[in-house]
Image (cartoon, rainbow, N blue to C red):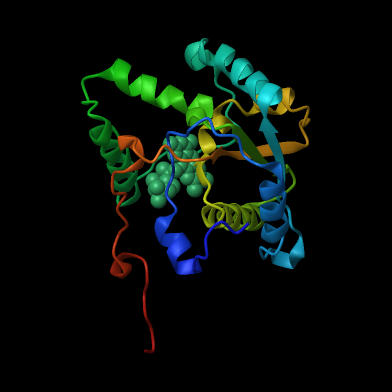
Amino acid sequence: MPATDISVANALQSRRSIRKFTDRAVDPVVLKTIFAAAQRAPSGGNLQPWQATVLTGEPWQAVKAAVAARLAMGREGYQPEYDIYPKELTDPWEARRFGVGEGLYAALGIPREDKAGRLAQFVENYRGFGAPVMLFLHCSRIMGPPQWSDMGMWLQSVMLLLVEAGLASCPQECWAMYGKTVRETLALGDGQILFTGLAIGYADEGAAVNQWPVPRVGLDEVIDWQGF
Ligand SMILES: Cc1cc2nc3c(=O)[nH]c(=O)nc-3n(C[C@H](O)[C@H](O)[C@H](O)COP(=O)(O)O)c2cc1C
């Protein structure tokens, strides 16, 4: 560590959400170094509200099995921790959300009519896309939006450090759909709220699902310059 000598800009450019991992194991010493570095992430009032549970092997299998049982229940199995998106998501955000889904399925050659194919790809989420390590990011339930943004800063710090170490990741808020089961399996208790999973491992570089271009809107849509 680091496996590569990479600038922050290059790490930002090359990080992407990886949705197919190899089964190569991840060295826990590398992870520990990354988490130690990510502790430098800023947080309002220096609260450092992020808490994470990192799993591999049997404990990770146990979460997958527990959530698979809920998945089999269909909609009745849902236990959402929070609304992943606003209930009424309007454009331009809805168009962006729709666009990324279509880009993903197009890269995999799964047409809209192939509902079973799309569902099968979605369910891959709950295998962590084959990642050998799963990190669950959670915090005390008393925390509010400012502390959730702190968790985001920690998460991005971890993801960039993973890139620097030659590792890959996929943030996965889909686990929050089964938050109670995840928390119970991890023995977290109701005082914690689950924000997201983060699948960690080595990317299957050749996989089409890891290669399609994920667009971003232009600066004119997000930055308002005043006084320049
Ligand atoms: C907090 C968070 C949760 C996410 N949850 C999921 C998820 O459950 N499943 C998934 O496939 N991608 C998930 N993503 C990945 C986003 O779709 C992805 O970041 C976005 O489309 C931009 O693509 P990129 O990460 O490849 O640059 C999540 C991203 C973030 C930041």
Q: What residue lies at 44% left-to-right and 41% top-to-bottom? A: 18
**Residue 65 x %, y %:** 61, 16
**Residue 70 x %, y %:** 57, 15
- Looking at the picture, does residue 148 appear above or below residue 13? above
Q: What residue lies at 45% left-to-right and 25% top-to-bottom? A: 124
Q: Is residue 173 left or right of residue 36?
A: left
The quarter of the displayed image where residue 206 is located? top left
Q: Is residue 223 left or right of residue 62?
A: left
| Residue 85 visible in this rendered orientation of the protein | no
- Looking at the picture, does residue 33 appear above or below residue 122? below
In the foreground, 103 or 203 = 203
- Quarter of the image that includes the C terminus: bottom left
- Looking at the picture, does residue 111 appear above or below residue 47? above
Q: What residue lies at 48% left-to-right and 13% top-to-bottom? A: 74
**Residue 227 x %, y %:** 39, 89
Q: Which residue lies most toward the bottom here?
A: 228
Q: Is residue 37 left or right of residue 220?
A: right
Ligand 1, what quadrant?
A: top left
- Quarter of the image that includes the N terminus: bottom right
In the foreground, 193 or 152 = 152
**Residue 25 x %, y %:** 60, 34
The quarter of the displayed image where residue 102 is located? top left
| Residue 224 visible in this rendered orientation of the protein | yes
- Looking at the picture, does residue 8 appear above or below residue 198? below
Q: What residue lies at 53% left-to-right and 38% top-to-bottom? A: 173
